[in-house]
Amino acid sequence: MFDLDKWHEIYLTLSRNKLRTFLTALGVSWGIFMLIIMLGAGKGLENGVMQGFGDFATNSMYVWTDNTTVSYKGLPAGRNFNLNNGDIDLLKRNVPEIETLAPRNQLNGYSEGNNVTYNNKAGTFEVFGDYPDMMKIQPKKLMQGRFLNDKDLKDSRKVAVIGKRVYDVLFAKDENPIEKYILINGVYFQVVGLYNTAGTSNMNARETEEIFIPFSTFQNAFHYGNIVGWFAITAKPEYKASMIEEKIKNVLKKSHQVAPDDDRAFGSFNAEKEFGQMIGVFSGIRWLTVFVGGATLLAGVIGISNIMLIIIKERTKEIGIKRAIGATPANIMVQVILESVILTFVAGYFGLVAGVGLLELVAWGLVEFEVEAEMFSNPTVDLGVALKALAALVVAGITAGLIPAYRTTKIKPVEALRAE
Amino acid sequence: MGDNKLHVLKGIDVHIREGELVSIMGSSGSGKSTLLNILGILDNYDSGEYLLNNTLVKDLSETKAAMYRNQFIGFVFQSFNLVSFKNAMENVALPLYYKGVSRKKRNLMALEYLDKMGLRNWAEHMPNELSGGQKQRVAIARALISQPKVILADEPTGALDSVTSLEVMNILKEVNQQGITVIIVTHEKDISEMTQRVIRLRDGVIEN
């Protein structure tokens, strides 16, 4: 039931000493403001980093060869060796935990000057020889045409899928690149597909300066024989990439006559491990935020509790009068708790709105002015978190009001009326 | 009253009948305020019995005491004790608020009682805009609105000049004529002379 008198009285009590009420409320506002900002910033950092991963399969690992460091079976240390096509079947057979196995080779354009030309335009791009499965590990957004398929691989077709930047550099505006022939290191390839990055940040832009050709074509065209540059591997969902890394290396060690204890013969990068660490860091940040923000909020709530005690002290006589004319202790307690809740809630609400507002402003600014923040993107707080914060404020308000409210029951009307 | 017991009243045997107009007199320290507090269920007593309307009033819970006060007793104080941020009408209506009467109904009743006190035109005024006599009349209206059996007035004229005092006393007499018991605590002789019976207190006992 709406009780106008009750609310009018709350308004009067709180507005009687505006500066004091404001400063008290500021404590709570600031607390929730900080909490929201920190949660949002943490989320922004998380989003930014996760976007860097893009659709990238996080349960993945990469393995390549380095020089051996231990002599073994008559072979010297410091031996240079390569992965080869034979390892593909070997790994598939011996490591059943593998879901996708993609051998890769790469021509590094950066060290070789302009390597790709079309008509009279030229550019420097990274060229990869890939299995079609590579799309599952590092997904791309196709804009036109298709990605590589198994038939390309089987027939060693001279086809290429190019990135958006490649297209921008080599082709005229609005020119259809499909079925055109580009020259890569002196070999003609027909363009069959054009892709863009799945992510939006500039970090992903480099991914569009790449050209993909079938793995088999790569080996033939550029005289790689059966050499495999490195393997990109994803583990089946029920296994962790970090767990199968050791097993894969052991299989490879055996087939390449590498000493079992030679840990530096193979290089590897484990995305799953890195990813897991990242997740750990973010969860750490979140806990820290909740702890620090919560403590700030608690200080604000204690401030409210204190001010309520002072208000009660000031209103002792008024409470006495009300008690004399029939107010029960419960009447007075409810009033005090309501005041506390209202003050906390309103203050918190303003802090919340200010915090969310600032986050939205930053998010808008990042997009609007195309800020190149590689590690920061879309700082937001879930609606659920905001609602939880508001619920917590109501609970905090009640808690803050409890001690002062209990104190009012100790006020005897006699004493209150005596206080002149 | 907690742990510190102070024996102010040392044996009071008095019977105030329904509809009486009684004054309690005594110098300061005679125990008259304590007696009034006990009569008003604002204070507890450690021995003896207090029967209000044939009901024993002793060691009540605060909630029960509040209920009895609301139901049976109207208070009038020396310093008026109006709630400073409520206007005259709201002050008068306050006891009904705690009885759970709707806002519209209680404000209407409050206006009625203010009218009886000749203060209808002052209903919207805040206490600090009223004179002492007007404040006390508002306080009397507030005491009457819950239709109590007893009006307890603690030095009701203590803060008023003699002309206004007379006005207030006349109002209290009128109230009494309507059948409500009125008990006035005072130390002024001419006030007590206007009542039907004077109970004189000295050092916690009734003197005759």
Image (cartoon, grey):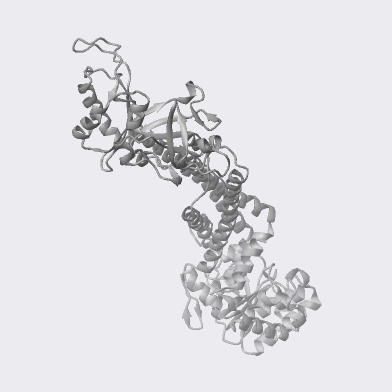
Quarter of the image that includes the C terminus of chain A = bottom right
Along the horizontal axis of the image, is A341 left or right of B113? left
Dividing the picture into quarters, in which one does residue A346 lie?
A: bottom right
Vertical position of residue A180 compared to residue A257: above or below: below
**Residue B171, visible in the rendered structure:** yes
* Coordinates of residue B74 in the picture (x, y in percent): 61, 78
B83 or A136: nearer the viewer: A136
Q: Residue at x 35, y 36 (%)?
A: A157
For the view shown, which residue lies furthest in the bottom direction?
A: B178
Vertical position of residue A313 compared to residue A243: above or below: below
How many tags in the picture?
Answer: 0
* Coordinates of residue A163 in the picture (x, y in percent): 48, 38
* Coordinates of residue A275 in the picture (x, y in percent): 38, 36
Dividing the picture into quarters, in which one does residue B194 lie?
A: bottom right
B17 or A213: nearer the viewer: A213
Q: Residue at x 33, y 27 (%)?
A: A220
Q: Residue at x 68, y 56 (%)?
A: A17
Dividing the picture into quarters, in which one does residue B201 lie?
A: bottom right
Vertical position of residue A163 compared to residue A322: above or below: above
Along the horizontal axis of the image, is B71 left or right of A221? right
A275 or A58: nearer the viewer: A58
* Coordinates of residue B29 in the picture (x, y in percent): 63, 64
**Residue B205, visible in the rendered structure:** no
